[in-house]
Amino acid sequence: MQAHEPKDFAASFVRLAEDAGQSLQKARGEIGKVIFGQETVIEETLVTLLAGGHALLVGVPGLAKTKLVETLGKVLGLDARRVQFTPDLMPSDILGTEILEEPTPGKRAFRFVKGPVFAELLMADEINRASPRTQSALLQAMQEGFVTIAGQRHDLPKPFHVLATQNPIEQEGTYPLPEAQLDRFLLQIDVNYPDRVAERRMLIETTGAEHAEPQAVLSAEGLVAAQRLVRRLPVGEQIVDAILDLVRSARPAPGSPLAEKLVWGPGPRASQALMLAARARALIDGRLSPSMEDVIALAEPVLKHRMALSFAARAEGETLGNIISGLTAKYR
């Protein structure tokens, strides 16, 4: 939103932002009926979708990652699908393939059969178990928004979001995502164990005869409209400078304090991700502009998968979480 725009436009923008914020709060409440004790995960997932990006969910099995994607599909009115990634999964199993048909006797033609990637919300379960070739096929679709089969372009639906999962413990038989592909995920969302209160509620409410059913709050068109709104939220110069300073300070430049601790750091895409994510978080909270609190809260999920510790730093027990916390300390 520009300062010189008419007052009636500004008032209309404020109304739209307030309505979107209320809808998103309601959506968060509906998801919370089914997903217990994961408020931060729910918020960061909504931030990812609202910012128009993709997320990498990292957590041990049994923490409702699959249930989260299913619930998001219902609440946001999106066509949601799930693909279990395995070592023998081929790119065509995700993207689709052409089959030879004979619609009329003596006349043959190829017909493209769409794969599960043609969904508005795709869960790539245990993405690091598939071969690099299959991973690359999906990640190219994430970046480009279309797939090319036999020289023909096939556009993916809009919106299109991928929520990929990884198990942080069991690494046998996996193909870790390269740095360039990790960078295509807007956020890395760590899914941790719920606290005792949340787990007790889960125990009671999921083992009875009745189960809570979330209600639809948005539609695909409503989500796209909210995504456009996010990009129009004004951002103060102080916040822009803080984002730039934070991301640039996380790079192991020669002579920097992190030169010995990091092998590589975040590129410009991290700055873009943090800006969009901060705007999205502000809108979810019903605010018209992001604050420093948004930047601090989202710094770790935005930066963590875009940085790598050196061998010496790992040997000393250093963690990326501690480094990012130290970088954001001066903004608290």
Image: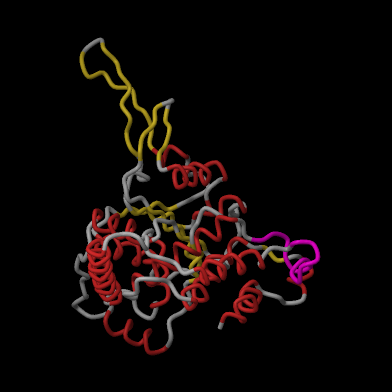
Q: Is residue 48 left or right of residue 20?
A: right
Which residue corresponds to the image point at 67% horizontal and 63% vertical from the top-left?
A: 308
Please state the horizontal and vertical placement of residue 45, each as a whole percent of the image. 40, 66
Q: Nearer the viewer, residue 130 or 38?
A: 38
Residue 38 coordinates in the image, percent (x, y): 40, 77
Residue 174 vertical position relative to residue 107 in the rendered view, above or below: below
Depth check: give the residue in front, 139 or 62.
139
Report the magenta residues as a range. Answer: 253-265
| 184 vs 257, nearest the viewer | 257
Would you say residue 318 is visible in this rendering? yes
| Quadrant in which the N terminus is drawn | bottom left
Residue 263, image quadrant: bottom right
Which residue is painted at 75% across and 65% down in the image?
310
The image position of residue 200, as x and y in percent, is 35, 87
Q: Image point 56% across, 60% down: which residue?
A: 270
Residue at position x 33%, y 30% from top? 112
From where the camera sits, is residue 63 visible? no
What colouring style does the render use? secondary structure
Quarter location, residue 99: top left
Q: Is residue 16 one of those drawn in magenta?
A: no
From the top left corner, tell me how far across and down residue 330 is, in percent.
62, 81
Is 256 colored magenta in this rendering? yes
The image shows residue 45, relative to residue 207, as above or below, that is above
Query: Picture quarter containing residue 28?
Result: bottom left
170 on left or right of 311? left
Magenta part mainly helix, strand or loop? loop
